[in-house]
Image: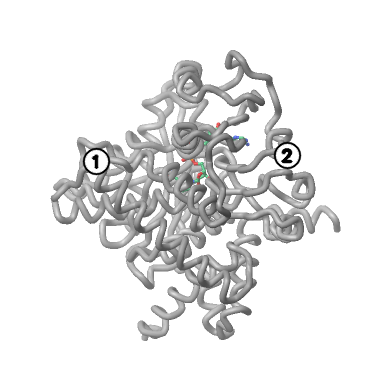
């Protein structure tokens, strides 16, 4: 019985539904509205047959889940990971709906994933998986239907292959089918850094609210990929002390602060952060419970659970990853007065600049990096302010406040569209 309870708590789809139900009561969503929003609109499971470099054939499983497009085209990343499940993709798709709504951009929510381990694939195998997966999901994606983007283990090159495959099937170039593309294919300046930059803006916004200076604050970051490494660099530049970071192989710690520019160089040569000079080894488990001012989980879901929430010593948690905290752990953190800046707000910088990329591509008029970053800051700041307003009004935590903003916007749009037919 205990295991069943744990299984449910560790299932991201359970977390996503519970978070929706928590806010439904506060905003008095009707049972019909809740029933509608609980269900993803479409789920596609595909087989991805690929000829491996050794001549053998392997069939990978891929998913694209479209949760909701009431406010605009579906939007959401594609993840390559050995532990991708349909429930994980469902949860990530629903979170994308709320994320687009909380920052008020005209998108819905979707997510995709392929069950594979990129560490064990050659670059050519990765390309063939990407192209065949794109082909299989091309019946439901498109620039005004559903626009994928990078996520865990996918990057600008993979988006380039998606754009090429989709375009070849339509016989003309269709850059708008994905965002997070290489700049040479119509990608936006600032997109690669956008999520980490948005996480940094969120840190600065909450510190400003608390009247605290970033300089000298101790920061711990789990995950040193796209989101974690950019946040580390930007916070370091602002004067924070990054005392620990980690990746899938484990973590490194230095109580005086890590030299982040040197670490970035080291990690790009060695792939992982392990054995970085002037640091001690620590496990991911230890890293999460270090005493610090700001903890940024920027790896995967379910990192802060009922098993470690009462041991967390951070004062503020800024969720760079999607779904790093389970709803049960959230209650424990709340009872300890730890401030949690929720994923749907804190890591929305990526989808905001994806939206900018789509707008620039549609207009065929491209902005400078400074313009992109300024507009991103405006959107992140005003979303933060509006969430704060709802937080004070309803006397709730930041996650519930962000959900109040997001779910109310989607519910209002739903009322205006009505139910077809
Ligand atoms: P990435 O693949 O670039 O990096 C992931 C990092 O996490 C790597 O350093 C990896 O080694 C590490 N990692 C993986 N498993 C781990 C584990 N069990 N423990 C510790 N570290 C582990 O991915 P990313 O794009 O940086 O995404 C990270 C998180 O941010 C994900 O939850 C993703 O959904 C979320 N996110 C990403 C974007 C984006 O624009 N890329 C936008 C919003 C949210």
**How many angstroms separate mark 2 from mark 1 (CA)?**
44 Å
In-front residue for pair 318/203: 203
Residue labelled with disc 2: 289
In-front residue for pair 224/178: 224
- Look at the image and tell me whether residue 66 can be seen: no
Color theme of the render: one colour
Q: Residue at x 51, y 77 (%)?
A: 36
Q: Position of residue 122 (x, y in %)?
A: 43, 24
Residue 406 located left or right of residue 190: right
Choose the circle earlier in sequence order: 2 or 1. 1
Q: Position of residue 17 (x, y in %)?
A: 61, 66
* 197, above or below 54, in the image: below
Residue labelled with disc 1: 164
Badge 1 density bin: few <14, some 14–19, many ≥20, Cα 10 Å: many
Image quadrant where one finds the C terminus: bottom left
Q: Residue at x 26, y 43 (%)?
A: 370
Q: Secondary structure at mark 2?
A: loop
Q: Secondary structure at mark 1?
A: helix
Q: Position of residue 407 (x, y in %)?
A: 50, 72
Q: Residue at x 54, y 68 (%)?
A: 403
- The reply to whether the residue tagged 2 has its Cβ within 8 angstroms of ligand 1 is no
């Amino acid at each position: 019985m205990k295991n069943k309870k744990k299984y449910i708590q560790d299932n991201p789809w359970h977390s996503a539904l519970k978070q929706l139900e928590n806010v439904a009561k506060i905003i008095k969503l009707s049972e019909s509205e809740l029933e509608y929003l609980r269900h993803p609109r479409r789920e596609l499971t595909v087989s991805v047959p690929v000829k491996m470099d050794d001549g053998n054939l392997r069939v990978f499983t891929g998913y694209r889940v479209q949760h909701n497009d009431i406010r605009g085209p579906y939007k959401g990343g594609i993840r390559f990971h050995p532990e991708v499940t349909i429930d994980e993709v469902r949860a990530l798709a629903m979170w994308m709906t709320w994320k687009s709504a909380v920052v008020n951009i005209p998108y819905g929510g979707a997510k995709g994933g392929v069950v594979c381990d990129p560490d064990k694939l050659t670059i050519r195998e990765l390309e063939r998986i990407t192209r065949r997966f794109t082909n299989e999901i091309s019946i439901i994606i498109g620039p005004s239907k559903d626009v994928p983007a990078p996520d865990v283990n996918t990057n600008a090159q993979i988006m380039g292959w998606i754009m090429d495959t989709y375009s070849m099937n339509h016989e003309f170039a269709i850059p708008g089918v994905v965002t997070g593309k290489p700049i040479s294919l119509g990608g936006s300046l600032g997109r690669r850094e956008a999520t980490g930059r948005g996480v940094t803006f969120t840190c600065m916004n909450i510190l400003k609210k608390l009247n605290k200076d970033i300089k000298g604050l101790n920061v711990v970051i789990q995950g040193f990929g796209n989101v974690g490494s950019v946040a580390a660099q930007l916070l370091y530049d602002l004067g924070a002390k990054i005392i620990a970071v980690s990746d899938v192989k484990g973590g490194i710690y230095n109580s005086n602060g890590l030299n982040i520019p040197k670490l970035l160089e080291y990690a790009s040569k060695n792939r992982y952060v392990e054995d970085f000079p002037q640091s001690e080894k620590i496990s991911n488990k230890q890293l999460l419970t270090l005493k610090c001012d700001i903890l940024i989980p920027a790896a995967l879901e379910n990192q802060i659970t009922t098993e470690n929430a009462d041991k967390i010593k951070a004062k503020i948690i800024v969720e760079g990853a999607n779904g790093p905290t389970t709803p049960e752990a959230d209650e424990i953190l709340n009872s300890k007065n730890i401030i949690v800046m929720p994923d749907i707000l804190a890591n929305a910088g990526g989808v905001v600049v994806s939206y900018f990329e789509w707008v620039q591509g549609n207009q065929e008029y491209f902005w400078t990096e400074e313009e992109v970053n300024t507009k991103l800051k405006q959107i992140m700041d005003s979303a933060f302010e509006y969430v704060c307003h709802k937080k004070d009004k309803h006397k709730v935590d930041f996650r519930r406040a962000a959900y109040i903003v997001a779910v109310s916007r989607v519910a209002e749009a739903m009322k205006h569209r009505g139910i077809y037919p």
